[in-house]
Image: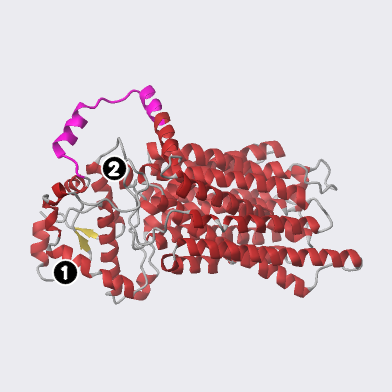
Amino acid sequence: MVNNYRSIDDFLSELYLYKHRAYYGSRKRILRSCEIPLPLLALCIANSSDATEILMLSYLLADSRFREQMFSEDSSSSSMEGAEYLASSIFVGMLIGGTVLGFLSDRIGRRPALLLGLLTNAVAGMCSSLPIFAPSFVQLTMWRFIAGIGIGATVPPLFTLASEWSSKEVRGVFVTAVASFWMVGSIFVSSLAWCLFQLDPEHELPIWRVFAATCALPSLLGAWMVYSYVPESPRFYLAVEKRDYDLAAKTCNQMALLLNVRVALDHEKESTLLGAAFDHRAVHPLTKDELLLNHQENVANKFNSLADAQSPTNRAKLNQAINSSVDSLRKLYSNQLLPRTTLPLQLLWFCLSFATYGITTWINTLFVAIQLENLYFNSFLFALATLPGNIVSMVYSDKYGRKKMLIGSLLGAACGLGIFATAVYSGSQQEIDDQSSASISPVRTFVIVLCACAFQAFGTISWNTIDIVTAEMFPTNVRSAGMGVCTATGRLGGILSQCVNAKLIGDDTGAGAAWVLVVASISLIFGAGMPLALDRDMVMEELRDDAIEGSTDCCPRKRKHVSDEETDMPQLQLQSSRSLEYQSFQQEIESNQPFLL
């Protein structure tokens, strides 16, 4: 038996190192550089489906045919009274979905909660596109609310899975890759709008219903891929009251197979076959005994407690779920987490959501209000601006740290909106003075589009970084609940922004559009101060599993030291031949760009 009693982090790091060595030692490096593992791709598509459902409303609000059918009784009217309720309904649903299922995913599992959210999103999206289910504004608002519940339910388990299935070496890149597929969803929805709405330039056909139905397809695809290729998190199986070491070990080995890393079935036989040669495509499977020793549990007591346990009734399960949610809230707002983790992250989510959701939902309406030409082309550029933001956050998130990335990106987005507002307001004043001006000048158009794209790029960096930070800062047994609380706070910001922006855009002088940008910029500037209050950066550090180990301190400043009694355990033999070779790979990481699992 191998004398290396590994933890889940050790095993995931080992998978990464094997993939890293195999990648750089392959003659097909160019082909392998384009290879995306299916578990990662499934989580990426799941995140892109959220983007399509949220951003599609921006294009619907800018479509005259949609406004005529939903907001006015006669086709000659262009009133949008009640648009704020439609725009905010999805964020109200996201608030409920993120709060409820954010806690439940710590109880029922990350994977079931994610699947439930994706399927809810897909069904509601399809129903909102059908005249029989959404003939009027009221029914459409209801289905958008239900879709919001599904979207809100996907975010906490999605990024919890991405964080818990990645090793510390690639956690920043892994989570950023998942977050970056918001860009794919935004580009998909903008390209789809550009193609479909151009088919009916006179706005005589209900193209918007076809558009809404197509935007629901990524959710179905994401649900199928998550069901097929994403196992449950092994850390969930090791959470309090759920310590199933055997299932956690099997899940880790299953992930190794999904990543195309061969698992050796017989340790001694494998080491004999390998001899001096090292097979970079095979790893020793993780065993429940290793996890038991790693978590300092007595095997006999474990099996005795399992034998004595009785199957709880349905009522008992409900009470356990309620007690688990209350206990999670108590831990999140304890003295250990509230001042340096929970509160700063909640305020940061609120400010960022207020600014970005407020702008992205109404960006096309803003373009129409200021008479910007080539609406769908400019909207496509706005969506494409997420690409440089994703590249920067993926390359530098682990290099410069989360706090610096957050502060710099938030201030950059605020500056972009400030210049955007100045160009809009100055142009509106010129149009008032010169009534003959029917359209804005090319220079002003360039400045407006450039500033909008700058805001989108910096905002993307902020979102990618805050997703990493939130998933890292909370301990395992409240990680998904912490994500749920933070995202719920962000939904409150999104709801408020829809109401505020709908009222401000109603000003036809152009000053209202400028005020929308100014208010969002102020929100970003305030949010830029929140990272300074966070506990610390978790760059290249293992996730906090202290709650799993039974520690009363949910947020320790330092890693727990090994006691004298523990030093007498067989774990002293960690310096085996495999362990030494494993540790020798560390220098390769520093000399090469991290490779995704």
**On the image, numbered disc 2 is attached to which residue?**
238
Work out whether mark 1 precedes mark 2 in sequence or the reverse, and give the earlier one: 2
Q: Which residue is mark 1?
A: 278
Q: Which residue is at 70% across, 67% downward?
A: 419
Locate residue 12, reporting x and y percent: 28, 57
Seen from the viewer's position, the closer of residues 80 and 73 is 80
Hey, what amino acid is under mark 2? Leu
The answer to whether one can see residue 279 in this image is: no
Q: Report the side of 582 relative to 514 (left or right).
A: left
Q: Is residue 313 magenta?
A: yes
Q: Is residue 436 left or right of residue 456?
A: right
Which span of residues is magenta-colored? Answer: 296-321
**561 vs 213, nearest the viewer:** 561
Disc 2, SS: loop
Residue name at image x 32 percent, y 47 percent: 545
The reply to whether residue 421 is in sight is yes
Magenta-colored segment: predominant secondary structure: helix
Quadrant position of the N terminus in the picture? bottom left
At label 2, counting other C-alpha atoms closer than 10 Å, the crowd grade (few under 14, some 14-19, many 20 or more) is: many
- Image position of 275 (left or right of 555): left
- In terms of depth relative to the viewer, which is nearer, 323 or 60? 323
